[in-house]
Image (spheres, rainbow, N blue to C red):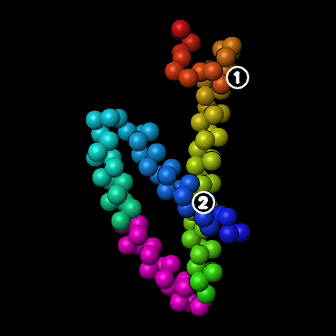
Amino acid sequence: MAVDHRILPGVALANFTLCVSEYSSLEKLPAAFGWHMVGKGVFVILFGPLIGAIRDWTDSYAICIHSQSFCIFLCVTAWSIELLLKRCRTKKNHRGYPFAQSGCLAGRTQDE
């Protein structure tokens, strides 16, 4: 159980930054990171007291840490669903293309 409390936060925090850089162009990257940090700050301001309230209500740090891990687990679950949907759409859009099954579509179109 201790492994998920050390690995999942690191995975989630690294993927937040990667998601921002993946979905924005090079020209818009500074602004995207700025909005990412603003969103992060708002999230901490809004949900930080909630985590503190969970600690106060339960009188247990363990339950507080588990609630934080659950929030991270929800994020990882959402990313996994997004990945599966992207793969299904890619296979659907490239049906009939000989390399579609092997995953060799990196940067290719059917016209090439």
Q: Nearer the viewer, residue 29 or 43?
A: 29
Q: Eyeballing the image, is 34 above or below 21?
A: below
Q: Which amino acid type is shown beneath numbered disc 1?
A: Ser
Query: Which dot marks residue 102?
Result: 1
| Residue 26 place in picture, x, y as percent | 32, 35
Q: Quadrant of the N terminus?
A: bottom right
Report the residue at 37% width, 39% height from top: 24
Q: Quadrant of residue 84?
A: top right
Left or right of 25 in this view: 112: right
Q: CA distance from mark 2 to mark 1?
A: 30 Å
Q: What segment carries the magenta color?
A: 42-59
Identify residue for label 2.
Answer: 8
Choose between 109 and 92: the one closer to the eye.
Answer: 109
Q: Is residue 81 above or below residue 103?
A: below
> In which quarter of the view is residue 38 placed?
bottom left
Question: Which residue is found at the position 61% from the left and 28% from the top?
Answer: 90
Is-magenta flag for residue 66? no
Q: State the SS at label 2.
A: helix
| In-front residue for pair 43/33 | 33
Residue 112 pos. (x, y %): 53, 8
**Count of labels shown?**
2
Foreground tag (2 vs 1): 2
The kind of residue on which mark 2 rests is Leu
Q: Tell me: residue 47, above or below residue 79.
A: below
Residue drawn at (63%, 54%), measured in percent from left and top?
77
Q: Is residue 11 visible?
A: yes
Q: From the viewer's perspective, is 95 left or right of 21?
A: right
The residue under the point 69% across, 13% down is 98
Q: Quadrant of residue 39?
A: bottom left
- Crowding at label 2, few (<14), some or many (≥20) Cα neighbours within 10 Å? some
Q: Is residue 44 magenta?
A: yes
